[in-house]
Amino acid sequence: GENVEQHPSTLSVQEGDSAVIKCTYSDSASNYFPWYKQELGKRPQLIIDIRSNVGEKKDQRIAVTLNKTAKHFSLHITETQPEDSAVYFCAARGGANNLFFGTGTRLTVIP
Amino acid sequence: ETGVTQSPTHLIKTRGQQVTLRCSSQSGHNTVSWYQQALGQGPQFIFQYYREEENGRGNFPPRFSGLQFPNYSSELNVNALELDDSALYLCASSSGVGSPLHFGNGTRLTVT
């Protein structure tokens, strides 16, 4: 089955700096890669996603890049703000229609 | 538009007991998936229901079972509870099998 690895597990940045979280996946059949943000005690919220026919997608301060050949994808957050502090999860979905999640990255934005 | 709602929010059970968790899907969504999230981990896929039929299952034993109703709401049943079943159980709905998932707030289950 699919195996998704996520790095780093924790990340601290100064407010205004950029944050990058990286994930790798193992199943070349995976074709959909969402990112979720989970604040303490709350639901995972979909913040951006990308499909395998696209290399990059951007939504305001958030962007995701996908390298199908290397089987890795990354989340980029620019001009970070304290409210960006949360746990971020990457995920991959293949033919089985279920999402395989990474282990999460705890992002702390220091004011 | 109503989002995904789950009940109860918290639950404490004793080892060996049975539990039923409930989920109402977002308006217009016909697919429901259940995930288990242990503390400090990413969600793990339990199973998915599409039009009242199971449409995929993760690596969970048969004592985890589910149902989907004609209104697309769903139940997760767990029999013979074990201590390791303590986790946040998340329900997610989508407008189709391959569409983005939208999660509910989850049910925090504690097994003592």
Image: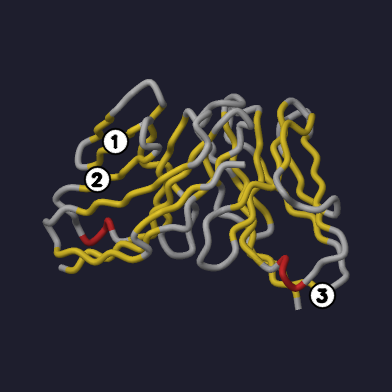
Can marks 3 and 1 be said to lie on one chain? Answer: no
Can marks 1 and 2 be said to lie on one chain? Answer: yes
Can marks 2 and 3 be said to lie on one chain? Answer: no
Which residue is depicted at the point 56% across and 48% down? B104
- Asked if the residue at tag 1 contacts the one at tag 3, i.e. Cβ–Cβ closer than 8 Å, the answer is no
* Place of residue B68 in the rendered image (x, y in percent of width and height, measured from the top left): 77, 36
- Asked if the residue at tag 2 contacts the one at tag 1, i.e. Cβ–Cβ closer than 8 Å, the answer is yes
Please identify, in this view, whether the residue under mark 1 or under mark 2 is nearer the observer. 1
Circle 1 is placed at which residue position? A65
**Residue B1 is at least partly visible in this image:** no
Please identify, in this view, whether the residue under mark 2 or under mark 3 is nearer the observer. 2
Which residue is depicted at the point 75% across and 52% down? B60
Circle 2 is placed at which residue position? A76
- Secondary structure of residue under mark 3: loop
* Place of residue B27 in the rendered image (x, y in percent of width and height, measured from the top left): 58, 30
- Secondary structure of residue under mark 2: strand
**Residue A102 is at least partly visible in this image:** yes
* Place of residue B41 in the rendered image (x, y in percent of width and height, measured from the top left): 53, 62
